[in-house]
């Protein structure tokens, strides 16, 4: 299905053409026409990399009334990185709209510019739950005019302990709004959330539950624990063009593995919770620009990283939960490209 068969205006279509999107992805085929025609709630089971941001972002930009200077849509996402990515994408879709203001609201950075942006009249808010609640408490952000709420990566938001913040935020929104819930997995907590906050809803499933994306090949190597690091080196050696994330369980492992790789002359760095926000940004930008080939990270640190063309995801240690493996491996094989997920 092509974008020009959608009932969207020329300005939106031109912006999508500029992005060189040609065909709708499967999640977009199911979600975009539905959101454009209907105001009912929706649950979409879709992982990062399926094109889900455009699946909700394009209809939101289509539905917004730019003449009205108050919040009409709010998108809640678990991390600052994801929040910035979503707002960047929305800005790209709406580049030919004149009076549109999209505000990103996230913690760990100066609140004043965010307050100013909301006060100047914003139509779309993209935020992390903690900071959004903060702005509501300060009476800066009012959600009485919200027509669309998106809960993006709902499973991750609940995993990260945002349940109470979400409750507080959703209670500020009108009852006749449209709620869209996107989640890679559907644990009971997400089911409960949807039962509490959603009316009659349609469910769309893109990849079946707990099933990795089909563009990802899964490999494994059986080695003794003491040979784990050497196995990792071999994998890097036989893939000189590797561009990937190596997942470890703990901050200590992450540091150790990254230090060893760097000592052994590999182009690597570590991303973990002990780093300050500016250190994290620095590592991320080096990785994004491919000045680093191997990013060694914990799951928490890697949340929300949206980097295309990763060739490999390496599980230095396996996670306890299947869902975490699905999230990790979903970071490669994006947008139709092939990727490899390796377990050592
Ligand atoms: P997401 O699942 O939203 O993180 O999107 C994954 C990547 O796919 C992003 O880099 C998008 O820019 C890209 N993308 C989204 N929709 C399309 C499309 N219809 N055609 C080509 N690329 C797309």
Image (tube, grey):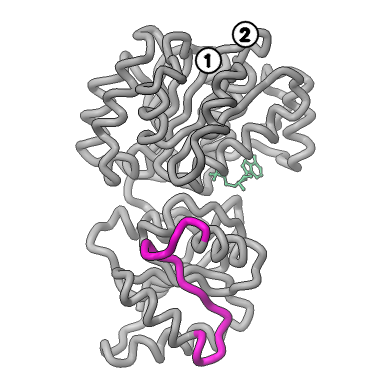
Helix, strand or loop at mark 2: loop
Give the magenta range: 262-278
Between 1 and 251, the one nearer to me in the picture = 251
**Left or right of 131: which side holds 21?**
right
Instruction: Name which residue lies at 58% across and 71% down.
Output: 243
Give the x, y percent position of residue 284: 55, 61
Instruction: Name which residue lies at 35% across and 71% down.
Output: 248
Task: Say which residue label 2 marks.
Answer: 68
Instruction: Name which residue lies at 37% across and 74% down.
Output: 254
**Left or right of 186: which side holds 260?**
right
Q: Is residue 264 magenta?
A: yes
Neighbor class of circle 1 (other Cα within 10 Å; few <14, some 14-19, many 20+) is many
Give the x, y percent position of residue 187: 24, 41
Task: Say which residue label 1 marks.
Answer: 72
**Left or right of 305: which side holds 190?**
left
Q: Is residue 327 magenta?
A: no
Between 2 and 78, the one nearer to me in the picture = 78
Whether pointer 1 and pointer 2 mark residues with C-beta atoms closer than 8 Å, the reply is: yes
Query: Height in image: 58 above or below 210?
Result: above
Instruction: Name which residue lies at 35% across and 37% down.
Output: 154
Between 59 and 211, the one nearer to me in the picture = 59
Residue 33 visible, this orientation: no
Give the x, y percent position of residue 238: 55, 87
Query: Height in image: 73 above or below 275?
Result: above
Helix, strand or loop at mark 1: loop
Neighbor class of circle 2 (other Cα within 10 Å; few <14, some 14-19, many 20+) is few
The quarter of the rendered structure image containing the N terminus is top right
């Amino acid at each position: 299905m092509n974008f020009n068969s959608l009932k969207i205006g020329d300005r939106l279509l031109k912006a999508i053409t500029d992005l060189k999107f040609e065909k709708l992805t499967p999640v977009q085929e199911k979600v975009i026409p539905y959101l454009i025609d209907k105001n009912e709630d929706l649950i979409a089971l879709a992982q990062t990399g399926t094109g889900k941001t455009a699946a909700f972002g394009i209809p939101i930009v289509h539905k917004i009334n730019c003449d009205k200077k108050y919040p009409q849509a709010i998108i809640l996402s678990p991390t600052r990185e994801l929040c910035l990515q979503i707002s960047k994408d929305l800005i790209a879709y709406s580049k030919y709209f004149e009076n549109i203001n999209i505000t990103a609201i996230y913690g760990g950075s100066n609140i004043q510019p965010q307050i100013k942006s909301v006060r100047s009249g914003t139509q779309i808010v993209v935020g992390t739950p903690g900071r959004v609640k903060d702005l509501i408490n300060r009476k800066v952000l009012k959600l009485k005019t919200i027509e669309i709420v998106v809960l993006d990566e709902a499973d991750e938001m609940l995993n990260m302990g945002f349940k109470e913040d979400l409750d507080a935020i959703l209670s500020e929104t009108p009852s006749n709004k449209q709620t869209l819930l996107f989640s890679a997995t559907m644990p009971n907590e997400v089911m409960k959330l949807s039962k509490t906050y959603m009316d009659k809803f349609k469910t769309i499933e893109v990849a079946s539950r707990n099933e990795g994306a089909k563009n990802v090949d899964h490999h494994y190597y059986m080695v003794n624990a003491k040979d784990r690091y050497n196995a990792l080196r071999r994998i890097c050696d036989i893939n000189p063009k590797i561009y990937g994330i190596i997942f470890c369980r703990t901050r200590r492992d992450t540091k150790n593995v990254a230090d060893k790789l760097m000592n052994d002359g590999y182009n690597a760095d570590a991303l973990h919770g002990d780093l300050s926000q500016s250190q994290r940004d620095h590592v991320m930008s080096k990785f994004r620009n491919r000045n680093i080939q191997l990013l060694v990270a914990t799951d928490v640190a890697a949340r929300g990283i949206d980097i295309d063309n990763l060739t490999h995801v390496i599980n230095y240690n396996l996670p306890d939960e299947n869902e975490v493996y699905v999230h990790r491996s979903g970071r490669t094989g994006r947008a139709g490209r092939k990727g490899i997920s390796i377990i050592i």
